[in-house]
Amino acid sequence: MENDVLSLLKKQMQTEIEAVSQALVSSGARDFAEYTAMCGKVTGLMVAQRLVGDMQARLQHEDD
């Protein structure tokens, strides 16, 4: 069950990464400050995804 929750969380993070990335590509940032904030959001989400993936791997290893 934990693995399902973590998979859903990773999927939601990926959806948000794609939305912000698409906004960046389509000139969604009004200025440099907003651009850097959007880049920071994507970076943070990517780090969080990696951490959740690591947790999934650990939980899977414990189940084996």
Image (cartoon, helix red, strand yellow):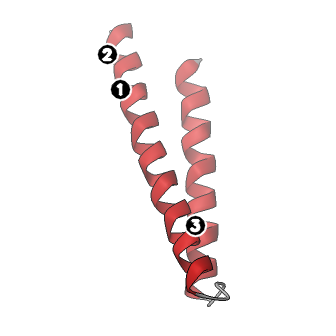
Q: Earlier in the sequence, mark 3 or mark 1?
A: 3
Instruction: Evaluate if marks 2 and 1 touch, with contact meaning CB atoms under 8 Å apart.
Output: yes
Q: Residue at 57% x, 66% y: name it.
A: 18
> Real-space Cα distance between discs 2 and 1?
6 Å
* Residue linked to disc 2: 61
Crowding around mark 3 (Cα neighbors within 10 Å: few <14, some 14 to 19, many 20+) is few
Observer-nearest residue: 15 or 24? 24
Name the disc covering residue 12, or none: none
Crowding around mark 2 (Cα neighbors within 10 Å: few <14, some 14 to 19, many 20+) is few
Q: Residue at 61% x, 70% y: name it.
A: 20
Observer-nearest residue: 40 or 18? 40
Q: Is residue 30 above or below residue 42?
A: below
Whole-percent x, y for residue 22 in the image: 60, 78
> Real-space Cα distance between discs 2 and 3?
30 Å
Q: Which amino acid does the dot numbered 1 rest on?
A: Ala
Whole-percent x, y for residue 4 in the image: 58, 27
Crowding around mark 1 (Cα neighbors within 10 Å: few <14, some 14 to 19, many 20+) is few
Q: Which residue lies furthest to the top in this view?
A: 63
Q: Is residue 11 above or below residue 34?
A: above
* Residue linked to disc 3: 18
> To which quarter of the image does residue 50 belong?
top left
The quarter of the rendered structure image containing the C terminus is: top left
Observer-nearest residue: 54 or 44? 44
Whole-percent x, y for residue 47 in the image: 42, 48
Q: Does dot 1 land on a helix, a strand or a loop?
A: helix
* Residue linked to disc 1: 57
> Real-space Cα distance between discs 3 and 1?
24 Å
Q: Does dot 3 land on a helix, a strand or a loop?
A: helix
Whole-percent x, y for residue 56 in the image: 42, 27
